[in-house]
Image (spheres, rainbow, N blue to C red):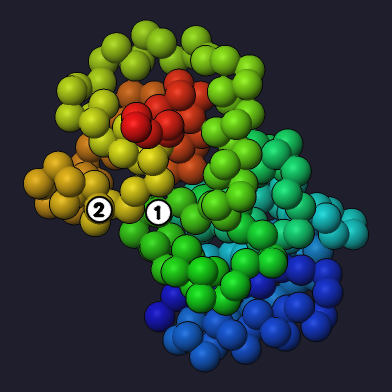
Amino acid sequence: MTRVLIVDDHDLFRDGIASLLRARGYRVVGEASNGLEAVERARALRPDLILMDIRMPEMGGLEATRIIKAEMPDVKVVILTVSDDEEDLFEAIKSGAQGYLLKKLKSEVFFDLIAGVAQGEAPISPRMAAKMLEEFSRYGRAKARADSERNLTDREEEVLQLVAQGKTNKEIASQLVISESTVKYHLRNILEKLHLENRAQVMAYAAQRGLGRRTP
């Protein structure tokens, strides 16, 4: 049972999301109303997953995410916010967040997206994923990590391409006719070679290279 910490400065929203989570079999172990409380409760409770708002009093969610990921890298943080600002998205990914979801998502879509977090998926609202691709294509390719990229194998390049298209590990395994454990092995190698921390950063990097656009 996934143990969840909910961080949001609106009591009514916390109550609502907690009820939905419990109905789906998640265990809500705590709540926090700002970033400072989030850090304290993360230290005390060691949840599996933190749903983190961005703009809160005393300390915002992005700063709290940076502190939590630095101290507890195994704790997964998914931003859950009303902000569809791409700068918030990019800063959240740089801060170590595993995903970025908008509060206006339908509940079925929300739960479909967070279900894969434990398997290393990167839940990002479709609207924000589109913004990420648009932003990188607008400003061109980055040359960062070019030397490391040359060390990727052909298979790792294929996996990177499919991750950029938003495919899950299961879909990648099916398309390449390999096991899901082999997909995870390739992803670990990609993270290490490109000096990235999680799947969300892999998606951003792949988008930066223009890999997310499918050919007609």
Answer whether residue 216 is visible to the viewer in this image.
Answer: yes
Q: Quadrant of residue 107?
A: bottom right
Residue to which mark 2 is pinned: 171
Residue to which mark 1 is pinned: 121
Q: Front-most of 127 and 13?
A: 127
Q: Are marks 2 and 1 in contact (CB under 8 Å)?
A: no
| Other-residue count near label 1 (Cα within 10 Å), few / some / many at <14 / 14–19 / ≥20 | many
User: What residue appears at the point 51 percent right and 69 percent down from the top-left corner?
Assistant: 109
Q: Residue furthest right?
A: 57
Q: Closer to us: mark 2 or mark 1?
A: 2
Q: Position of residue 7 (x, y in %)?
A: 71, 68
Sequence-wise, which precedes: disc 2 or disc 1?
1
Answer whether residue 46 is visible to the viewer in this image.
Answer: no
Q: Quadrant of residue 195?
A: top left
| Other-residue count near label 2 (Cα within 10 Å), few / some / many at <14 / 14–19 / ≥20 | some
As helix, strand or loop, the secondary structure at mark 1 comes to: loop
Q: Is residue 65 left or right of residue 58?
A: left
User: What residue appears at the point 34 percent right and 59 percent down from the top-left corner?
Assistant: 119
Q: Position of residue 101 (x, y in %)?
A: 61, 58
Q: Front-most of 89 and 34?
A: 89
Q: Position of residue 197 (x, y in %)?
A: 46, 38
As helix, strand or loop, the secondary structure at mark 2 comes to: helix
Q: Residue furthest front?
A: 216
Q: Position of residue 183 (x, y in %)?
A: 21, 45
Q: Front-most of 42 and 25?
A: 25
User: What residue appears at the point 40 percent right and 37 percent down from the top-left corner?
Assistant: 164
Q: CA distance from mark 2 to mark 1?
A: 12 Å
Look at the image and tell me in which quarter the C terminus lies.
top left
Q: Front-most of 9 and 131?
A: 131
Look at the image and tell me in which quarter the N terminus lies.
bottom left
User: What residue appears at the point 17 percent right and 29 percent down from the top-left corner?
Assistant: 155
